[in-house]
Amino acid sequence: MAEPLFLNSQMHEKIWGGTQLRDVFGYEIPSDKTGEYWAISAHPNGVSRVANGRFQGLGLDRLYREQKDLFGNPDSPVFPLLTKILDANDWLSVQVHPDDRYALEHEGELGKTECWYVLEAEEGAEIIYGHEAQSKEELAQMIEAGDWEHLLTRVPVKAGDFFYVPSGTMHAIGKGILILETQQSSDTTYRVYDFDRKDDQGNLRELHLQKSIDVLNIGKTAHSTPAKLVVENLASTLLVSNEFFTVYKWQILGRESFARVAPYLLCSVVGGQGLLEVEGQVYKLKKGDHFILPYDVAHWAFEGELEMIVSHPHS
């Protein structure tokens, strides 16, 4: 029987984490330094497990390997995407991610292109998004000199903003921001600067300066231009589409029927509540639910007042 795959997933404590994952979404968190919820993940550092139906208890990594038909028999040997919610109670490190070629050669996994949908942001919140260096030589000199004031590009943010962060982009999420991140399934991060913070043992966290310089892009950061389409009871905003993923924001008000347009969809409810109907079966949805609509779900309907971030990979 065709059915959605609801998921139970893992929390990750971080030096910059807080309590928003509990306060906003009602999740159980391990501590008041909880930074990330890997909501839809088959990455070995945090595998989601199916919470319902005939595959209940099975890890998404194993399900993807053993039931390829559920995902349209894709070519990718690993589940290609990862959906996270991040609670930045303090600044994340200034960092960069490599592309596939560099990451496979140096880290043995995929590179990391990602994008951010800002769920909540404190007054005056900002991110670092790009840098001002005009050449690799100038970049290296400014990093070595610690000239962060002139090197880093700061951008103010508010709830509802969207940022496309391709591999090679200098970036950092600022204090007081809650985001949903869609990314390639990778956990490779190169830290450029960490505000000279120390961990619980009094140690500075490792930096990766040479690798960062190797992979950082020079020039303007690539933006996406969201495009909105309104039909009946659905407002669909195409946030970004690239060689790795397509990401939408769906706002449902009432009832809307859908037909499959991709082998499978990753769905995150970020606001409201409602119902999902698949083959006559009805599933309750609430803020904080995450699920996959696999290949055998060819038709479905949503009903209620729902805001979702929905993505699918590109083959």
Image (cartoon, helix red, strand yellow):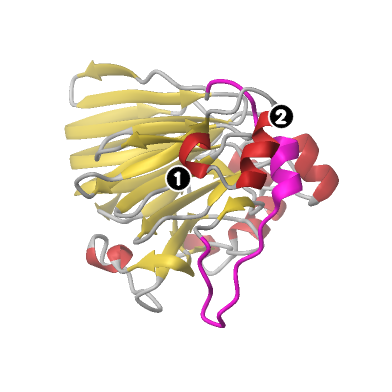
Please report the residue visible at 35 percent of the width from the left and 28 percent of the height from the top.
Answer: 258
Image vertical order of residue 64 relative to residue 182, above or below: below
Tell me the SS state at disc 1.
strand
Residue 247 in view here: yes
Q: Quadrant of residue 225?
A: top left
Local crowd at mark 1 within 10 Å, few (<14), some, or many (≥20)? many
Which residue is denoted by mark 2 in the rendering?
A: 136
- Amino acid type at image mark 1: Glu
Q: Nearer the viewer, mark 2 or mark 1?
A: 2
When the figure is inspected, residue 244 is found, relative to residue 304, above or below; the finding is above
- The image quadrant that residue 159 belongs to is top left
The x and y percentages for residue 298 are: 46, 33
Kindly identify the residue that appears in the image at 51 percent across and 62 percent down: 54
* Residue 80, visible in the rendered structure: no
Q: Quadrant of residue 69?
A: top right
Q: Position of residue 177 (x, y in %)?
A: 32, 50
Left or right, 100 with reference to 97: right
Q: Estimate the x, y position of residue 207 in percent, counting from the top left.
A: 66, 57
Residue 216 magenta-highlighted: yes
Q: Quadrant of the C terminus?
A: top right
Q: Furthest-bottom residue in view?
A: 201
Give the magenta range. 196-220
Which residue is located at x 62 percent, y 47 percent?
A: 185
What SS does tag 2 mark?
helix
Q: Residue at x 62, y 38 (%)?
A: 142
Q: Which residue is mark 1?
A: 181
